Image (cartoon, grey):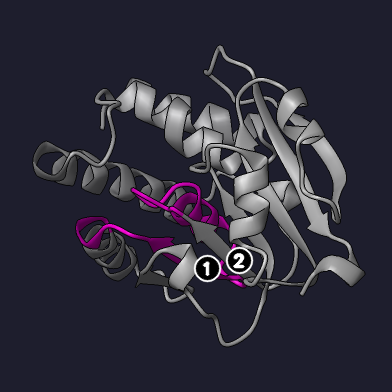
Amino acid sequence: MDGVVVARLEAGLEALGLDRDPERIQAQQHYLELMVRWNRVHNLTAIQGDRELVSHHLLDSLSIHRFLHGDRVLDVGSGAGLPGIPLAIYHPARHFTLLDASAKRVRFLRQCALELGLDNVVAVHARIERYTPVEGFATVVSRAFATLADFTLAVRHAVSPGGHMLAMKGRYPAAELDALPTGVRVHAVHELQVPGLDARRHLADLGWEANDHN
C-alpha cells in the first residue's frame, strides 16, 4: 500500500473520531491487502484500486462505529467482511459473527480472522433464514439487503429483545421506511459522513416492538 493510500486511511480515521493506533492501522492495511489478493481469483468486490477500497469499504464500514450496541454483533451477508472486519479491528471487546451464504467468501473471512489475529470474529456459512443463533444479538447490521422490510423480517429471529437492526443505505430511504412491517420502530436515520466518498450514505437504526418481536 503506497504512502498516499496510508495517509488517506489515517486522515479518514481521524475524521471519524477513531484513534490512529499503529497496530490497528497495520491491521486495516493487512486486511486491504488480503482483499486485493483474494479478489484476483474470487471476485470479492467490484472495486479494484487501493484508494477506492479505503473510502468505499474501510471508511464506509467504520462510519457506523458509534452506533453499535451491546457486546454481540451479527453482520448479515458480510461478503468480503464489510462492515464486520473493519469494525472488529476497532472493537476488540465486542464479538462479531460474520454470516454469508457463499462458501468461498466464508473461507476468505476465516483466513482474515486468522491472519489478523481477530479472536473476536467468527465466520459462519449460512443463509440468515436457516441460521439459528444460540442467543440473540444486540446489534444486527447489513449492507447487503435490498429493502428495509426484507431485512427486518429476515433477521427478526436473530436480534435480541430491545436489539438494534442497522441497515446501511445510500440515499435517504423514504419509501422503504414507509413500507416497514407493522411492529418495527424507527429509532433514527443517521446521515453518514464518509471521508473521501462523494456520495450520500445513511444508516437506518430499527428495532422490533416488544409485542411484535417473536
Q: What amino acid type is highlighted by mark number 2?
A: Val
The quadrant holding residue 64 is top right
Residue in front for this viewpoint, 127 or 32: 127
The quadrant holding residue 6 is top left
The quadrant holding residue 39 is top left
x and y percentages locating residue 118 in the rendered image? 41, 69
Residue 97: say if magenta: yes
Q: Tell me if residue 56 comes above or below residue 163 in the rendering.
A: above
Residue at coordinates 37% horizontally, 68% vertically from top-left?
126
The single residue placed furthest to the bottom in the displayed view is 134
Residue at coordinates 75% horizontally, 62% vertically from top-left?
69
Kindly identify which residue carries mark 2: 73
Q: What amino acid type is highlighted by mark number 1?
A: Phe
Q: Secondary structure at mark 1?
A: strand
Residue at coordinates 52% horizontally, 18% vertically from top-left?
196
Label 2 Cα neighbours within 10 Å, binned few <14 / some 14-19 / many ≥20: many
Question: Are circles 1 and 2 on residues that touch, CB within 8 Å?
Answer: yes
Part of the protein shown in magenta: 77-105
Left or right side of 150 for 162:
right
Residue in front for this viewpoint, 6 or 194: 194
- In this orientation, does residue 26 appear? yes
Residue at coordinates 63% horizontally, 17% vertically from top-left?
200
Kindly identify which residue carries mark 1: 96
Q: Tell me if residue 47 comes above or below residue 13 in the rendering.
A: above
Left or right side of 180 for 45:
left
Q: Tell me if residue 52 comes above or below residue 74 in the rendering.
A: above
